[in-house]
Image (cartoon, helix red, strand yellow):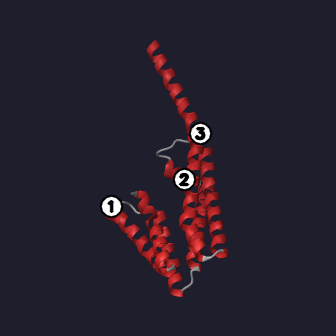
Amino acid sequence: MQLFIEYFPLLVFFIINSIAGIYWATGSLIVAAFIQLFYYKFKKEKIPTKQWIIFGLIVVFGGLTIYLQNDAFLKWKVTIINAFFAGALLVSNTFFKKNIIKEFLSESLSLPENIWSRLNFSWAMFFLFCSGLNYYIAFNYPLDTWVNFKVFGLTGLMFLFSITSILFLYKYLSVEDDEIDTNNITREKSEKSN
């Protein structure tokens, strides 16, 4: 259900764009993003900061797109969101010694600091890559190509990079788990011999 809520505005945008065009799709995106926030309130969950930022950018750039009848603003939104996430990861880690990726995942993962830093940097570079790629496709290809890229291309890249990150961590964690198992076995043997 959480995955559906996460991608609900994007799905609405894609469907309405194919039926009624970019400006109706943009209006629908704004409404869907509002419904997404309302869902969190309805479930009595804290709205993640990321959702507030995305909602704000959707309203501002979506509003400008509709008001000025210029889809360039909507195209810029995707570029800016990805650049913002990249910047947040890099600036918070470099200047404030705060690893955002570690904060999100530390409850479920235990990793050495250098691995957290590499993971944080990798995600920052990924968001920067997506920002540049979106800009290139948005302003060098037809609108429908960009819409398909925004809905399917960026989503596919996100899943692919997430899987790659998991595989990287799994490889590292399997070694750590083996060490923990070895330590437990050694401790159990020493307790039995005493």
Contact (Cβ within 8 Å) of mark 1 with mark 2 = no
Estimate the spatial distance between the alpha carbons at disc 1 and disc 2, rounded to whole Å: 25 Å
Estimate the x, y position of residue 47 in percent, counting from the top left.
41, 63
First in sequence: mark 2 or mark 3?
2
Residue 179: which quarter of the image?
top right
- Residue situated furthest bottom in the rendering: 68
Give the mark, 1 or 2, whose residue is nearer the N terminus. Answer: 1
- Residue 75, x across and y down, in percent: 58, 75
Q: Are marks 3 and 1 in contact (CB under 8 Å)?
A: no
Quarter placement of the C terminus: top left
Characterize the local packing of mark 2: few (<14), some (14-19) or many (20 or more) Cα atoms within 10 angstroms: some
| Residue 164 percent location from the top left of the image | 59, 49
Q: Which residue lies under the disc numbered 3?
A: 171
Residue 101 numbered mark, or none? 2
Q: Which residue is rendered at x = 56% and y = 69% of the image?
A: 148
> In front of the other: label 2 or label 3?
3
Q: Which dot marks residue 44?
A: 1
User: Of helix, strand and loop, which one carries label 3?
Assistant: helix
Residue mark closest to the camera, 3 vs 1: 3
Which residue is found at the position 55% from the left and 38% from the top? 173
Report the amino acid beneath label 1. Answer: Lys
- Residue type marked 2: Ile
